[in-house]
Image (cartoon, rainbow, N blue to C red):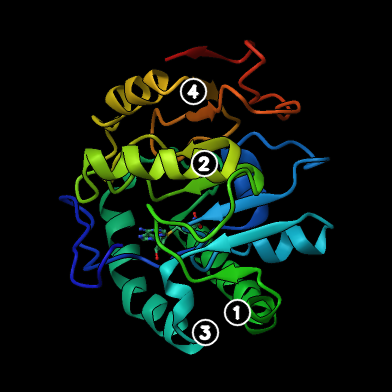
Amino acid sequence: MVKETQYFSSPEFDLGGVVPWGRRLREYQAFFALGDLAGIGPVLDAGGGPSSFAAEAVSAGLRVIAADPIYSFPGEAIAARFEETAAAMREGMARAAYRFNWHYYGSEAAVHRLRREALALFLADFEAGKAAGRYVPAALPDLPFADGAFRLALSSHLLFLYGDTLDFDFHVEAMRELLRVADEVRVFPLFNLDGRPSSHLPGVVEALRGDGVRCALREVPFEFQKGARRMLVARRGDARGPSFGPGSCDNRRGGRNV
Ligand SMILES: C[S@@+](CC[C@H](N)C(=O)[O-])C[C@H]1O[C@@H](n2cnc3c(N)ncnc32)[C@H](O)[C@@H]1O
């Protein structure tokens, strides 16, 4: 589990800990090439934080569970942590503006607005959603779910991004755990906070392939960190049923094998 005392930083981003910044459903659709979401549940959002993905997806009729250690805290504490880190995040993004492709968001202010929208939607759903089992306090690499409980597990802005703090073994263990509970795992981005490709990626893929997992890098219709245009799609060799949409591991268009 990532402890409060761990510091995630890069020359431009001095974040002082895990940043509870969340993204919206339409951003997840782009990160993971999810298309119109038809038939993709049940889905696990691992490290979902204050993203509104689960809240928005459930409203759209999908079965989604989000897991994150911060869900053991009340909503007010999560909101307070967001406020504590917002200034450092905004300053870091402004300092590192040259490292981003602004085509999708337009401006740092627009990114900030989206993060606040996501937080508000998440908070509005959190207490009732937690009571309904939609928000589960849990930390990789140990998840409290049965084998094969999900068709798809997503990891957005945790694995690889914080690869300077979360070591190689953590990544392999986390991916194995995600593949235990889900047929298919998608991870985005594959760059670290410095805006460079994660050095863990080739070794993680090699370890998973050794387990019989099919791995591919697929292009996605999104780029914010310059050059970070691909997700990792990992699919258990014994997975039943079809993969999903244009990012499918079984669909060789739009990407290449690792
Ligand atoms: C930058 S946020 C991303 C939130 C969301 N996935 C998104 O993209 O909007 C990273 C999240 O990972 C969570 N996290 C940190 N360590 C974790 C672990 N070991 N297992 C699961 N989640 C973890 C943090 O609490 C935080 O909410």
144 in relation to 103, above or below:
below
The disc at residue 75 is: 3
Which residue does the numbered mark 4 point to in the structure image?
213
Q: Quadrant of ligand 1?
A: bottom left
Q: In 3D space, how far apart are the residues under numbered discs 3 and 4 (Cα atoms)?
A: 37 Å
**Along the line of sight, which residue is nearer the eye, 210 or 252?**
210
Disc 2 marks which residue? 180
Q: What residue type is labelled 2?
A: Arg
Closer to the observer: label 3 or label 4?
4
Binning the other alpha carbons within 10 Å of mark 2 as few (below 14), some (14 to 19) or many (20 upward) gives: some
Dot 3 amino acid type: Gly
- At x 29%, y 38%, the residue is 195
Q: Choose the circle earlier in sequence order: 2 or 1.
A: 1
Secondary structure under the numbered disc 4 in the rendered image:
loop
Instruction: Name the quadrant of the N terminus.
Output: bottom left
Secondary element type, mark 2: helix
> Dots 4 and 2: beta carbons under 8 Å?
no
Contact (Cβ within 8 Å) of mark 1 with mark 3: yes
Left or right: 54 in relation to 256: right
Provide the residue designation for mark 1: 123
Q: Position of residue 7 (x, y in %)?
A: 18, 63
Residue 195 appears left or right of 104 = left
Residue 70 percent across, percent down from the top left: 43, 73
Is disc 1 placed on a helix, strand or loop? helix
**Distance from label 4 to label 1 (Cα)?**
36 Å
